[in-house]
Image (tube, rainbow, N blue to C red):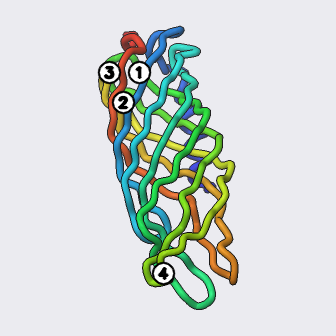
Amino acid sequence: MKKLFYAFIVMVSLAQWAHAQEQNKFRVGLDFGYVMPDGGGGILLAIEPKYNVADNMNIGLRFESAAMAKNIKGGGLTLEADLAASTSYLGTFDYYFHNGSSSFAPFMGAGAGYSTLANIGVQELGPDEVEVDGKFGGLIRAGFELGKFRVAASYNLIGKSDLGDGAEVKNSYFGISLGFYIGGGKWKN
């Protein structure tokens, strides 16, 4: 966590030469990717409408669905749950570090919101599913845009779910995504 904080400070200090896309423009991003929860894996799909509040900043709403299998730990057992989709609804903020000489634009961002979590089912324990409640959480991410294409690495911070009898499932996950966006103007030079 300390390294992430120092990386953020360095990037913010480099912002003196940052120029970015056009202020007051609206755009919509679509991302596809791979998620890595505690054990297991899965896929993600996200749509994110954004508004450019400044030439190097935007705010948005991210709607993400991540279908994944996760590990359940507790009571001396570790089991893999069936594949199930969770959905996140997050308010986001991105800051772009762009030098004005090309369409390559690195960025860092964060978000906060609510995640609805899929019920947990394990084949070894029978056909019943364990219901879990949704949780408030956050998102930190970094990546780059090249023209209208986007590559990002994100970490979704979502609290653990207690399944009873000492069993729990970690809901946080790391994701890598590729995507593109429509609208938003052009990077200023």
- Please report whichever mark, 4 or 1, sits nearer to the chain's N-terminal start: 1
Q: How many marks?
A: 4
Q: Residue at x 48, y 76 (%)?
A: 127
Q: Quadrant of the C terminus?
A: top left
Task: Give the amino acid at mark 4.
Answer: Gly
Distance CA(mark 4)–CA(mark 1)? 57 Å
Task: Give the amino acid at mark 2.
Answer: Glu
- Please report whichever mark, 2 or 3, sits nearer to the chain's N-terminal start: 3
| Circle nearer the viewer, 3 or 4 | 4
SS at mark 1? loop
- Residue 99 position within the rendered picture, expressed as x and y whole percent measured from the top left: 41, 21
* Label 4 crowd (10 A; few <14 / some 14-19 / many >=20): few
Query: In the figure, 36 relative to 28: above or below?
Result: below
Q: Quadrant of the N terminus?
A: bottom right
Q: Which residue is mark 3?
A: 103
Distance CA(mark 2)–CA(mark 1)? 13 Å
| Circle nearer the viewer, 2 or 1 | 2
- Toward the viewer: 21 or 112? 112
| Circle nearer the viewer, 1 or 3 | 3
- Residue 33 position within the rendered picture, expressed as x and y whole percent measured from the top left: 35, 47
Q: Which residue is mark 4?
A: 126
Q: Are marks 2 and 3 in contact (CB under 8 Å)?
A: yes
- Please report whichever mark, 3 or 4, sits nearer to the chain's N-terminal start: 3
Q: Which residue is mark 2?
A: 145
